Amino acid sequence: MSARPHPLALTLKPLIDAIGGAVIPLDEIEQGDITLDWEGEPAVGVRLADMVSLDRLVATVEHQLGAPLAELDRATKQRAVLLLDERGAFRLRKSIEDIGEAMGVSRITIYNYLSALKNGG
């Protein structure tokens, strides 16, 4: 039996849907989500689709590939770079450095992976 949605979630759902967001239960709120209070207590979270978070993109790719970026082999790291590139991760400020650090490789390696992808290899 699932819990009944909070009245605030029910009230805001049409607006949040219209702006491309999602209502998130309190126990699923992540960094970058917005917590909304009801009578002084946290009630629901809101995740806005247009707010891209590098942490969220990396977490999604790690989940998809089944391991943290640093634990992937070379070929799978290249696949991770492809997935991150497709999702716009490298348009974010300092993302090359941050993803390189998460993978345990240099930013030059990330640039090489991206170059190989763009050249069909």
Image: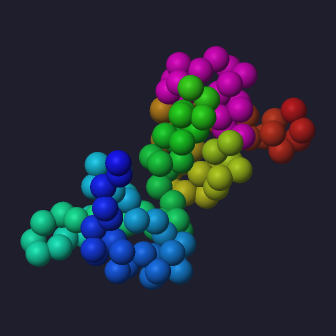
Residue sitting at x 64%, y 17% = 73
Question: Would you say 116 lies left or right of 110 here?
Answer: right
**Does 85 appear in magenta?**
no
State left or right for residue 26 relative to residue 85: left
Q: Is residue 19 left or right of residue 77?
A: left
- Which residue is situated farthest in the front direction here? 1
Residue shown at 53%/68% (left/top)?
50
Q: Report the quarter where the C terminus lies.
A: top right
- Which residue is at a point 54% across and 42% down the rendered structure image? 60
Q: Image quarter for residue 46?
A: bottom left
Q: Does the magenta run of residues contain 74? A: yes
Work out whether 117 lies above or below 12.
Answer: above
Residue 106 in the image: above or below residue 97? above
Residue 99 spot, x, y in % from top left: 53, 39
Q: How many marks?
A: 0
User: Residue 32 location, x and y as percent?
Assistant: 37, 58
In the image, residue 111 sits, relative to residue 48, either above or below, namely above
- The residue drawn where x is 35% and y is 80% is 11
In this view, which residue lies farthest toward the left? 40
- Looking at the image, can residue 33 be seen? no
Residue stretch in magenta: 67-82
Would you say residue 121 is visible in this rendering?
yes
Toward which corner of the image does residue 33 lie, by quadrant? bottom left
Name the outermost residue toward the right: 120
* Residue 66 located left or right of residue 110: left
Q: In the depicted view, which residue is nearer to us: 84 or 45? A: 45
Residue 6 % position (x, y):
27, 67
Majority SS type along the magenta span:
helix
Could you say which is closer to the camera, residue 114 or residue 17? 17
